[in-house]
Amino acid sequence: MTNNSETSMESGDSAEVSEERRALTPDVTSFLPSKPPGSVSGLAQHVNRQIAVQRSSPLEPLAQRLVPWLRKFRADSYAFFRRPKRIRSLSELMREPIRQQWVSIDFFDTLVIRHVEPPDYVLKKVAEISVEAINRRTGLILTEADYLHARRSCEHALRRENQKYHGQDGEALLPAVLERMLRQFNAGDAELLNTLLELEVGLESDALSLNESAAELLRYLQSENKKVVVLSDMYLPPACLRDFSKRLGIGDCIDRFHVSGESGLAKHSGRLFEHVLAENGLAAAEILHIGDHVHSDYSVPARLGIDARWLYDPSRWKKKIQIGRKLRHRPENFMRRIIEERSQSLYQPAEELDRTLFQHLSPAVFCMAYQSLRACVSLGIGRLYFLAREGITLRRVFRCLVDNHPEFAPYDFQFRTLYCSRSSTVCGQLDPSGDADQLISMVAERSSDFSIDGLFAAWNVSGSASEFGIGNPPVISSREELLDFLREHPEFCNELIHGISVERDLLIRYLDQQGVTDGPCAFVDVGWSGTIQRNVQALGLGTQIYGMYIGTNDKFEANNLRGLVFSSSDYRAGAIHKSAGLTETLLSVSDLPTTIGYEVKEGEIQPVFGGNTESNHSIAPVRDRVLNDFYPVFRDLTRKYCIPTPVLTEHARQQYFDLVRRPSRAFLKAAATLEFNFDWGREQASPLVSRISLGDYLRPRRTLSALWYSPWLFGTLKASYLGVLNRPLSWVLGHEGLINREKLKKRAGFLRKS
């Protein structure tokens, strides 16, 4: 009686279930083998009864998800333990006769391999490069999290609609997903849609490489006159897979491509196999399928009667798991190992300078250039001005990325070199109606040399006091004395202001001639204080100028003055800023003199150069060669492994910090001939690394002063066998806010000037 009543109840309630619910509710018994274990079958049938009986139960969604999972687990485990027809490499198929005339092959992880683990890294990288294009076109301020949320929600909704209303397997194509997402952002632009498609497809293409023996197998099948069909559960259109195949050199070996996103039928349900068989008029025994997924590529086709081979290579899966674990938990170590292996293959052990620049300087420079271009894309800036001299080296890196990196192919950038220096632009700080107080304020900012010569040097004025009507200038050594002198000689003060105003007008004409006033633009340089940009902005040109720098000081950092590698939020920026002389020397173009002013020549404003034009070291050609060698590594990190930009930045930051704080003896030896130019372009050069003599150790005050004013403090300490102080000193410089500077100045007189 109990069994009959249960059967009656089940049949009665089943009659009330709508046709739509019948279509969405899977029947687990139709997918199980003929003689499955009773426990699994009983549990699955119980779940089916609960779906039919408890129509309004809150457990119904859970049951609907549990049934397909049980079906898949039962089929996969049953096939796995029966020792399926597995192969460890594609080359094994060439050692056995293939009776079938048609061969279907899975695309991803079978013919081609992704080097990205986990696969979500691809979507995160897509979000990075796509959100900037959307912001540029629409004016929105979207984040990567906003893009990922909108992308996933639109894809999920589209899959459910296709499954519910079209009777498909819940598959969707990428163009439809992106079009729906753009409508959600109120940006239904066909050009923007094509840009997003190009960016994502290009990234997918760069992340792929050909599997071992894949080309040999396809050539073998082609020689045997076999028909090769590619099947893939993928959201990309078939045309994209064909382009991938052509790029990898196997496009002519594949006859047709079938993608689940196009037909709405998937491999995991078996309907894509049935679609291919029906479309080509084939029986199940007439086709051989090869794939790496035990369920979609072996269990399902085997159930349909298709001869299937499961590609199972434990070593490859182990390697993928290891790469994924390293990228998730220790990505910096993974990148460091890749860069070190590439440097060892490029340079000999004796080329220590090349290897050091390759491993420590190049990541920071490329990361800065990469972030700058991404920021320009987001802000809609197409004109970049590189400030000579260090900017010329950065311009080569920017040009390398724009010409070779697919991410920036859709955009048009204009690069120009701007011959400006701190000396030639200091006139921008002058107010035409200025007075003596403004003249003295610049002396206090630049050198604190309150003399007539110090006043001329602060405002970059050439000549002497006699040329301005002062025959015998008095000896002046304090701020008050200089201020009194300027007030007592108003003619001299006015003449000096007039001379600076003339230089100011020439600077404005030069910037207008170079197109700086045409619209928003970006200045690119090493950075730290952003002096040149602040001087130009003080001119009041009426245009928005953004600063893209390697690092900035927290005293001057602003929204339009950004340190893209080192900023005030990082404790390492203090040590890097104190060693700014090292960065400027490594990136400087040594055979280009400093710009000291401008003149009218042949109807145009031309820069006036001063200083020595001869190179005093040979690091420039080595540095340029190393930067050219580093781009393939950077492309692999950003495209092949899809490393997120914050991870890249952190690695570059730490590598350069290690170079500054812990230089090797070999690098110090190579840097012994380098000189750094002090005093804003004046010809007052100092060795980058100067060893403290034994006699100076007996004079602590002199030793501390030499260390503090050294262009590279940590290099000088290491060369003087005081490298043990580098670590605590770098911590002190990174936590200056915790130090009482007033008490420190009272105890150390040499710090009062700073």
Image: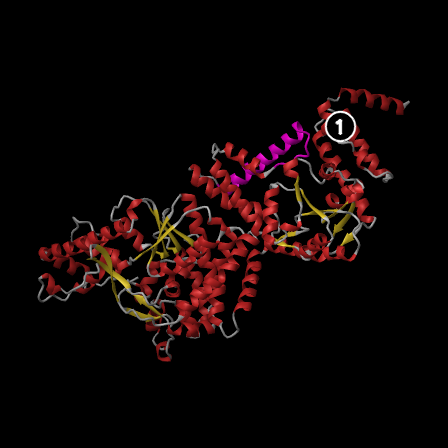
- Residue at point 50% right, 40% down? 194
Residue 128, placed above or below residue 418: above
Number of residues whose C-alpha sits closer than 10 Å to that of mark 1, classed few (under 14), some (14–19) or many (20 or more): many
* In the image: residue 704, left or right of residue 106: left
Q: Quadrant of residue 731?
A: bottom left
The count of marks equals: 1
Q: Position of residue 421 (x, y in %)?
A: 29, 59
Closer-to-camera residue (100/667): 100
* In the image: residue 650, left or right of residue 453: right
Residue type of the residue flagged with mark 1: Ile
Q: Position of residue 677 (x, y in %)?
A: 31, 67
Dominant SS type (magenta): helix
Per the image, is 305 magenta?
no
**Quadrant location of the N terminus?**
top right
**Quadrant location of the C terminus?**
bottom left
From this viewpoint, which residue is outermost toward the bottom? 695
* In the image: residue 468, left or right of residue 306: left
- Residue at point 73% right, 50% down? 225
Q: Position of residue 684 (x, y in %)?
A: 28, 69
Residue 714, placed above or below residue 698: above
Q: Is residue 656 visible?
A: no
Residues rendered magenta in the picture: 143-172
- Residue at point 41% right, 68% down? 621
Q: Position of residue 257 (x, y in %)?
A: 65, 43
* Residue that badge 1 annotates: 51
Q: Is residue 247 visible?
A: yes
